[in-house]
Amino acid sequence: MSHLDSLSQTTVTSTLNDDWAVLAISGMDSAKFLQGQLTCNLQDITLQQSRLGAHCTHKGRMIASFRLLQTAEQSYLFLLPKETLAALQKSLSKYIVFSKAKLHDASNDYVLRGISGANARQRITEVFGAAPETINTQHNSEHGTVICINPTTPRYLCIIPQAAAAAIESALSASAQTTDQHFWNACDIREGIGSVRTETIEEFIPQMLNLQVLDGISFTKGCYTGQEIVARMQYRGIFKKAMYRISSNGAAPLPNTAIFQENNTQAVGHIVNAENIDDKNWEALAVINHDAIAHALHLENTASITVLTLPYTL
Protein backbone atom coordinates (compact mmCIF):
# COMPACT_ATOMS: atom_id res chain seq x y z
CA MET A 1 0.00 0.00 0.00
CA SER A 2 1.39 3.42 -0.96
CA HIS A 3 1.74 6.31 1.47
CA LEU A 4 -1.04 8.07 -0.45
CA ASP A 5 -3.36 5.08 0.01
CA SER A 6 -2.57 4.93 3.73
CA LEU A 7 -3.36 8.61 4.22
CA SER A 8 -6.56 8.25 2.21
CA GLN A 9 -7.92 5.86 4.85
CA THR A 10 -7.67 8.50 7.57
CA THR A 11 -9.03 12.03 7.94
CA VAL A 12 -6.57 14.45 6.36
CA THR A 13 -6.44 18.24 6.18
CA SER A 14 -4.29 19.81 3.45
CA THR A 15 -2.79 23.29 3.56
CA LEU A 16 -3.06 24.79 0.07
CA ASN A 17 -2.07 28.47 0.20
CA ASP A 18 1.56 27.80 -0.74
CA ASP A 19 0.46 26.37 -4.09
CA TRP A 20 -2.97 27.87 -4.83
CA ALA A 21 -4.07 31.47 -5.33
CA VAL A 22 -7.36 33.36 -5.21
CA LEU A 23 -8.29 35.93 -7.88
CA ALA A 24 -11.39 38.00 -7.12
CA ILE A 25 -13.65 39.85 -9.54
CA SER A 26 -16.54 42.12 -8.61
CA GLY A 27 -18.68 44.84 -10.18
CA MET A 28 -22.00 45.11 -11.98
CA ASP A 29 -20.59 43.67 -15.24
CA SER A 30 -18.67 40.78 -13.69
CA ALA A 31 -20.91 37.94 -14.87
CA LYS A 32 -21.32 39.40 -18.36
CA PHE A 33 -17.59 39.95 -18.69
CA LEU A 34 -16.68 36.46 -17.51
CA GLN A 35 -19.28 34.88 -19.77
CA GLY A 36 -17.34 36.23 -22.74
CA GLN A 37 -13.97 35.03 -21.47
CA LEU A 38 -14.35 31.57 -19.93
CA THR A 39 -15.21 28.09 -21.17
CA CYS A 40 -17.72 27.46 -18.37
CA ASN A 41 -21.26 28.91 -18.33
CA LEU A 42 -21.75 31.64 -15.74
CA GLN A 43 -25.45 30.74 -15.58
CA ASP A 44 -24.42 27.43 -14.01
CA ILE A 45 -22.41 29.17 -11.28
CA THR A 46 -24.51 30.21 -8.30
CA LEU A 47 -24.13 30.57 -4.56
CA GLN A 48 -24.79 26.81 -4.42
CA GLN A 49 -22.78 25.62 -7.43
CA SER A 50 -19.14 26.03 -8.53
CA ARG A 51 -17.55 24.98 -11.81
CA LEU A 52 -14.20 24.04 -13.25
CA GLY A 53 -13.22 26.08 -16.29
CA ALA A 54 -10.49 27.62 -18.40
CA HIS A 55 -9.49 30.91 -20.00
CA CYS A 56 -8.03 30.54 -23.48
CA THR A 57 -6.20 32.45 -26.17
CA HIS A 58 -7.96 33.22 -29.45
CA LYS A 59 -6.44 29.98 -30.74
CA GLY A 60 -8.17 27.99 -28.00
CA ARG A 61 -5.01 27.35 -25.99
CA MET A 62 -5.44 27.39 -22.21
CA ILE A 63 -3.79 30.26 -20.36
CA ALA A 64 -5.15 29.02 -17.05
CA SER A 65 -7.47 26.42 -15.57
CA PHE A 66 -9.40 27.06 -12.36
CA ARG A 67 -12.41 26.49 -10.17
CA LEU A 68 -14.85 29.44 -10.19
CA LEU A 69 -17.33 30.11 -7.39
CA GLN A 70 -19.77 32.90 -6.59
CA THR A 71 -19.55 34.63 -3.22
CA ALA A 72 -22.23 37.33 -3.67
CA GLU A 73 -24.21 38.95 -6.47
CA GLN A 74 -21.71 39.88 -9.23
CA SER A 75 -18.78 38.70 -7.08
CA TYR A 76 -16.70 35.64 -7.95
CA LEU A 77 -13.48 33.91 -6.92
CA PHE A 78 -11.07 32.00 -9.15
CA LEU A 79 -9.12 29.25 -7.36
CA LEU A 80 -6.05 28.32 -9.39
CA PRO A 81 -2.37 27.39 -9.14
CA LYS A 82 -0.40 30.35 -7.82
CA GLU A 83 2.11 30.08 -10.66
CA THR A 84 -0.55 30.86 -13.31
CA LEU A 85 -2.23 33.71 -11.42
CA ALA A 86 -0.21 36.46 -13.12
CA ALA A 87 -0.89 35.08 -16.60
CA LEU A 88 -4.65 34.87 -15.99
CA GLN A 89 -4.83 38.32 -14.41
CA LYS A 90 -2.79 39.88 -17.22
CA SER A 91 -4.92 38.30 -19.95
CA LEU A 92 -8.28 39.17 -18.37
CA SER A 93 -7.08 42.71 -17.67
CA LYS A 94 -6.66 43.31 -21.40
CA TYR A 95 -10.39 42.77 -21.95
CA ILE A 96 -11.89 44.18 -18.76
CA VAL A 97 -11.12 47.87 -19.40
CA PHE A 98 -14.54 48.56 -20.92
CA SER A 99 -16.49 46.64 -18.27
CA LYS A 100 -17.71 47.81 -14.88
CA ALA A 101 -15.76 45.13 -13.05
CA LYS A 102 -12.47 44.91 -11.20
CA LEU A 103 -9.95 42.14 -10.66
CA HIS A 104 -7.66 41.82 -7.67
CA ASP A 105 -5.40 39.21 -6.13
CA ALA A 106 -7.30 38.08 -3.01
CA SER A 107 -4.90 35.30 -2.01
CA ASN A 108 -4.06 36.97 1.30
CA ASP A 109 -7.76 37.43 2.13
CA TYR A 110 -8.52 33.71 2.34
CA VAL A 111 -7.11 30.52 3.77
CA LEU A 112 -7.55 27.48 1.53
CA ARG A 113 -7.82 24.09 3.21
CA GLY A 114 -8.72 20.68 1.91
CA ILE A 115 -10.23 17.97 4.08
CA SER A 116 -10.71 14.39 3.02
CA GLY A 117 -11.20 10.91 4.35
CA ALA A 118 -13.53 8.89 6.54
CA ASN A 119 -14.71 11.64 8.89
CA ALA A 120 -14.45 14.58 6.51
CA ARG A 121 -18.19 14.98 5.99
CA GLN A 122 -18.89 14.89 9.73
CA ARG A 123 -16.12 17.43 10.44
CA ILE A 124 -17.41 19.79 7.73
CA THR A 125 -20.94 19.55 9.13
CA GLU A 126 -19.72 20.31 12.64
CA VAL A 127 -17.65 23.30 11.60
CA PHE A 128 -19.74 24.85 8.80
CA GLY A 129 -23.23 23.71 9.78
CA ALA A 130 -23.77 21.50 6.71
CA ALA A 131 -21.83 19.62 4.05
CA PRO A 132 -22.59 19.95 0.32
CA GLU A 133 -23.65 16.55 -1.01
CA THR A 134 -22.81 16.40 -4.73
CA ILE A 135 -19.81 17.25 -6.91
CA ASN A 136 -19.21 21.00 -7.38
CA THR A 137 -21.97 22.06 -4.96
CA GLN A 138 -21.11 24.51 -2.22
CA HIS A 139 -22.34 25.52 1.22
CA ASN A 140 -21.84 29.05 2.52
CA SER A 141 -21.71 30.06 6.17
CA GLU A 142 -20.31 32.84 8.32
CA HIS A 143 -17.15 30.74 8.64
CA GLY A 144 -16.55 30.47 4.89
CA THR A 145 -17.48 28.40 1.85
CA VAL A 146 -17.17 24.64 1.43
CA ILE A 147 -17.16 22.93 -1.98
CA CYS A 148 -17.75 19.22 -2.47
CA ILE A 149 -15.01 17.81 -4.69
CA ASN A 150 -16.01 14.17 -4.28
CA PRO A 151 -18.90 12.83 -2.17
CA THR A 152 -18.03 9.14 -2.64
CA THR A 153 -14.49 9.25 -1.27
CA PRO A 154 -15.25 12.38 0.75
CA ARG A 155 -13.17 15.40 -0.21
CA TYR A 156 -14.03 19.04 0.42
CA LEU A 157 -12.36 22.36 -0.36
CA CYS A 158 -12.73 25.11 2.25
CA ILE A 159 -12.37 28.81 1.43
CA ILE A 160 -12.06 30.57 4.78
CA PRO A 161 -11.94 34.36 5.30
CA GLN A 162 -8.69 35.33 6.98
CA ALA A 163 -10.52 36.76 10.02
CA ALA A 164 -12.03 33.36 10.85
CA ALA A 165 -9.06 31.25 9.80
CA ALA A 166 -7.38 30.47 13.13
CA ALA A 167 -10.48 29.08 14.85
CA ILE A 168 -11.75 27.20 11.78
CA GLU A 169 -8.37 25.66 10.97
CA SER A 170 -8.06 24.41 14.54
CA ALA A 171 -11.52 22.84 14.42
CA LEU A 172 -10.91 21.20 11.04
CA SER A 173 -7.53 19.78 12.06
CA ALA A 174 -8.62 18.24 15.36
CA SER A 175 -7.76 14.50 15.35
CA ALA A 176 -6.72 14.71 11.70
CA GLN A 177 -3.39 14.32 9.94
CA THR A 178 -2.10 17.50 8.32
CA THR A 179 -0.49 17.44 4.88
CA ASP A 180 0.47 19.99 2.27
CA GLN A 181 -0.66 20.56 -1.31
CA HIS A 182 1.12 17.48 -2.64
CA PHE A 183 -1.40 15.10 -1.08
CA TRP A 184 -4.30 17.23 -2.35
CA ASN A 185 -2.84 17.44 -5.84
CA ALA A 186 -2.29 13.67 -5.87
CA CYS A 187 -5.98 13.22 -5.05
CA ASP A 188 -6.82 15.52 -7.98
CA ILE A 189 -4.71 13.29 -10.21
CA ARG A 190 -6.60 10.18 -9.10
CA GLU A 191 -9.89 11.94 -9.80
CA GLY A 192 -8.75 13.06 -13.25
CA ILE A 193 -8.71 16.80 -12.50
CA GLY A 194 -5.77 18.41 -14.28
CA SER A 195 -4.42 21.93 -13.95
CA VAL A 196 -2.39 24.21 -16.17
CA ARG A 197 1.03 25.02 -14.72
CA THR A 198 3.74 27.46 -15.82
CA GLU A 199 5.31 24.91 -18.16
CA THR A 200 2.00 24.19 -19.90
CA ILE A 201 0.54 27.69 -20.40
CA GLU A 202 -0.85 27.78 -23.98
CA GLU A 203 0.07 24.13 -24.59
CA PHE A 204 -3.36 22.48 -24.38
CA ILE A 205 -6.89 23.09 -25.57
CA PRO A 206 -9.58 22.44 -22.91
CA GLN A 207 -10.68 19.06 -24.29
CA MET A 208 -7.14 17.76 -23.93
CA LEU A 209 -7.61 18.11 -20.16
CA ASN A 210 -11.03 16.40 -20.40
CA LEU A 211 -12.86 19.55 -19.30
CA GLN A 212 -15.86 18.61 -21.43
CA VAL A 213 -16.29 15.52 -19.21
CA LEU A 214 -15.87 17.57 -16.02
CA ASP A 215 -18.58 20.16 -16.87
CA GLY A 216 -15.88 22.75 -17.49
CA ILE A 217 -16.96 23.64 -21.04
CA SER A 218 -20.33 24.91 -22.23
CA PHE A 219 -21.14 24.33 -25.89
CA THR A 220 -24.42 26.28 -25.76
CA LYS A 221 -23.54 29.56 -24.02
CA GLY A 222 -22.33 31.49 -27.06
CA CYS A 223 -19.08 33.26 -27.83
CA TYR A 224 -16.04 33.53 -25.59
CA THR A 225 -12.34 33.96 -26.29
CA GLY A 226 -11.16 30.82 -28.10
CA GLN A 227 -14.70 29.45 -28.48
CA GLU A 228 -14.50 28.94 -32.24
CA ILE A 229 -11.55 26.54 -31.96
CA VAL A 230 -12.95 24.70 -28.93
CA ALA A 231 -16.37 24.25 -30.58
CA ARG A 232 -14.88 23.15 -33.90
CA MET A 233 -12.88 20.44 -32.16
CA GLN A 234 -16.02 19.21 -30.42
CA TYR A 235 -18.43 19.17 -33.32
CA ARG A 236 -15.99 17.76 -35.84
CA GLY A 237 -14.92 15.12 -33.37
CA ILE A 238 -11.24 15.90 -33.89
CA PHE A 239 -9.88 14.30 -30.74
CA LYS A 240 -6.46 12.85 -31.37
CA LYS A 241 -5.41 13.37 -27.74
CA ALA A 242 -6.90 13.20 -24.27
CA MET A 243 -5.73 13.22 -20.68
CA TYR A 244 -4.91 9.83 -19.17
CA ARG A 245 -3.77 8.75 -15.72
CA ILE A 246 -0.40 7.03 -15.67
CA SER A 247 2.22 5.80 -13.21
CA SER A 248 5.89 4.91 -13.05
CA ASN A 249 8.79 4.71 -10.63
CA GLY A 250 11.35 7.30 -9.56
CA ALA A 251 10.95 11.02 -8.95
CA ALA A 252 7.77 12.65 -10.27
CA PRO A 253 8.43 14.38 -13.62
CA LEU A 254 7.77 18.07 -14.20
CA PRO A 255 4.76 19.32 -16.18
CA ASN A 256 5.31 19.20 -19.97
CA THR A 257 7.84 16.38 -19.70
CA ALA A 258 7.69 14.43 -22.96
CA ILE A 259 6.34 10.87 -23.24
CA PHE A 260 7.56 8.54 -25.96
CA GLN A 261 6.28 5.40 -27.63
CA GLU A 262 8.59 2.44 -27.99
CA ASN A 263 10.79 2.73 -31.10
CA ASN A 264 9.55 6.26 -31.80
CA THR A 265 11.72 9.33 -31.26
CA GLN A 266 8.82 11.78 -31.52
CA ALA A 267 6.87 12.62 -28.38
CA VAL A 268 3.36 11.12 -28.22
CA GLY A 269 2.34 12.95 -25.06
CA HIS A 270 3.25 15.34 -22.27
CA ILE A 271 2.84 15.37 -18.49
CA VAL A 272 0.12 17.66 -17.13
CA ASN A 273 0.59 17.13 -13.38
CA ALA A 274 2.56 14.54 -11.41
CA GLU A 275 3.06 13.70 -7.74
CA ASN A 276 5.00 11.03 -5.87
CA ILE A 277 2.64 8.66 -4.05
CA ASP A 278 5.47 7.15 -1.98
CA ASP A 279 9.28 7.08 -1.95
CA LYS A 280 9.54 5.00 -5.11
CA ASN A 281 6.53 5.68 -7.34
CA TRP A 282 4.57 8.52 -8.90
CA GLU A 283 1.22 9.00 -10.58
CA ALA A 284 0.40 11.64 -13.15
CA LEU A 285 -2.10 13.01 -15.59
CA ALA A 286 -0.77 13.27 -19.11
CA VAL A 287 -2.10 14.32 -22.50
CA ILE A 288 -1.35 11.38 -24.81
CA ASN A 289 -2.23 10.51 -28.39
CA HIS A 290 -5.11 8.03 -28.44
CA ASP A 291 -3.34 5.73 -30.90
CA ALA A 292 -0.28 5.48 -28.64
CA ILE A 293 -2.10 4.21 -25.54
CA ALA A 294 -2.02 0.57 -26.63
CA HIS A 295 1.76 0.67 -27.08
CA ALA A 296 4.66 0.61 -24.64
CA LEU A 297 5.30 4.12 -23.32
CA HIS A 298 8.25 5.65 -21.51
CA LEU A 299 9.88 8.91 -20.48
CA GLU A 300 13.11 10.10 -22.04
CA ASN A 301 15.01 8.55 -19.12
CA THR A 302 13.52 5.18 -20.22
CA ALA A 303 11.25 4.84 -17.16
CA SER A 304 8.38 2.65 -18.38
CA ILE A 305 4.83 3.92 -17.95
CA THR A 306 1.67 2.10 -16.86
CA VAL A 307 -1.70 3.48 -17.97
CA LEU A 308 -4.23 3.53 -15.10
CA THR A 309 -7.99 3.99 -15.05
CA LEU A 310 -9.81 7.29 -14.66
CA PRO A 311 -13.01 7.66 -12.62
CA TYR A 312 -14.92 8.76 -15.72
CA THR A 313 -15.31 7.69 -19.35
CA LEU A 314 -13.58 9.63 -22.11
Image (tube, rainbow, N blue to C red):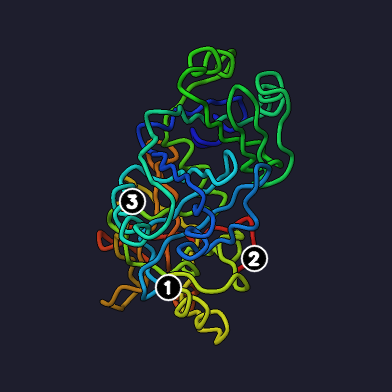
* The N terminus - image quarter: top right
Amino acid type, label 3: Gln
How far separated are the C-alphas under marks 1 and 3? 17 Å
Q: Is residue 88 left or right of residue 195?
A: left
Q: Position of residue 216 (x, y in %)?
A: 56, 60
What residue is pinned by disc 2? 313
Give neighbour class at mark 1: few <14, some 14-19, many 20+ (Cα, 10 Å): many
In the image, residue 264 lies at what x, y percent? 30, 78
Residue in view at x 58 percent, y 19 percent: 172
Position of residue 167 in the picture relative to residue 255 (left or right): right
Corner quadrant of residue 22: top left
- Residue at 36% x, 76% y is 59
Earlier-in-chain disc, 3 versus 2: 3
Residue named by callout 3: 89
What residue appears at the point 71 percent right and 31 percent down from the top-left corner?
131
In the image, residue 308 above or below residue 227: above
Res. 271 image quadrant? bottom left
Residue 147 visible here: yes
